[in-house]
Image (tube, grey):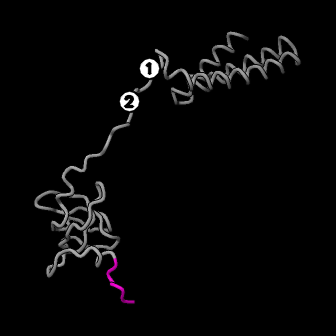
């Protein structure tokens, strides 16, 4: 009984860190087996106490393994020890693209590809559909998101007009 209890606890605790279900299922079967042995060999009263004890010990074991195993020497070998603190995505020269013009290589529905000076750039529109071949102009850079609008040949980009094309007219 005690051997099955220890084996089952170890397997259930390992299942938290090694997903797949097989180790945890085998551990659960070992715990159920140890409880059945307690009922058969020791009687109903002892079996009920044993069942309650197994449940409490399993919960404590899971808690302790989640809290302390990752920091143990064995846990450090098991788990990736990296952090994303201090990481910032590079904007890769995107701010310099503001105001430049290109041609839609794909339909922009509202996302697609634009040829900009021989470079393929992922872009989005403000929500409208633009067919392939449309001349577009970059009006806004939001992180790595490049926003375009139809290029107006007569004037430079007017962001306020783009945001509210009706310009106050109802």
Which quadrant is the C terminus positioned in?
A: bottom left
Q: Which mark is residue 76?
A: 1
Q: Secondary structure at mark 1?
A: helix
Q: Position of residue 1 (x, y in %)?
A: 73, 11
Q: Secondary structure at mark 2?
A: loop
* Residue at the image position 28 percent from the left and 68 percent from the top: 108
Q: Is residue 2 above or below residue 158?
A: above
Q: Give the mark count.
A: 2
* Residue at the image position 88 percent from the left and 18 percent from the top: 45
> Disc 2 marks which residue?
82
The secondary structure that most of the magenta stretch takes on is loop
Magenta extent: 164-170
**As drawn, which residue projects farthest toward the left?**
117
N-terminal label among 1 and 2: 1
- Does the magenta-highlighted stretch encompass residue 2? no
Q: Position of residue 149 (x, y in %)?
A: 25, 72
Q: Position of residue 129 (x, y in %)?
A: 31, 73
Q: Is residue 49 left or right of residue 19?
A: right
Please rate how many residues cluster around mark 2, counting C-alpha atoms within 10 Å: few if below 14, some from 14 to 19, many from 20: few
């Amino acid at each position: 009984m005690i051997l099955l209890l220890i084996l089952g606890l170890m397997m259930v605790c390992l299942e938290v860190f090694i997903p797949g279900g097989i180790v945890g299922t085998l551990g659960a079967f070992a715990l159920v087996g140890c409880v059945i042995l307690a009922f058969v060999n020791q009687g109903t009263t002892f079996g009920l106490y044993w069942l309650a004890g197994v449940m409490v010990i399993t919960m404590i074991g899971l808690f302790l393994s989640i809290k302390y195993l990752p920091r143990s020497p064995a846990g450090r070998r098991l788990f990736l020890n990296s952090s994303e603190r201090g990481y910032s995505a590079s904007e890769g020269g995107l701010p310099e693209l503001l105001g430049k013009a290109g041609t839609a290589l794909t339909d922009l529905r509202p996302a697609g590809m634009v040829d900009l000076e021989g470079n393929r750039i992922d872009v989005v529109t403000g929500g409208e559909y633009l067919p392939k071949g449309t001349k577009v102009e970059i009006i806004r850079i939001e992180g790595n998101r490049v926003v375009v609008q139809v290029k107006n040949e007569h004037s430079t980009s007017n962001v306020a007009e783009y945001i509210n094309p009706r310009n106050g007219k109802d």
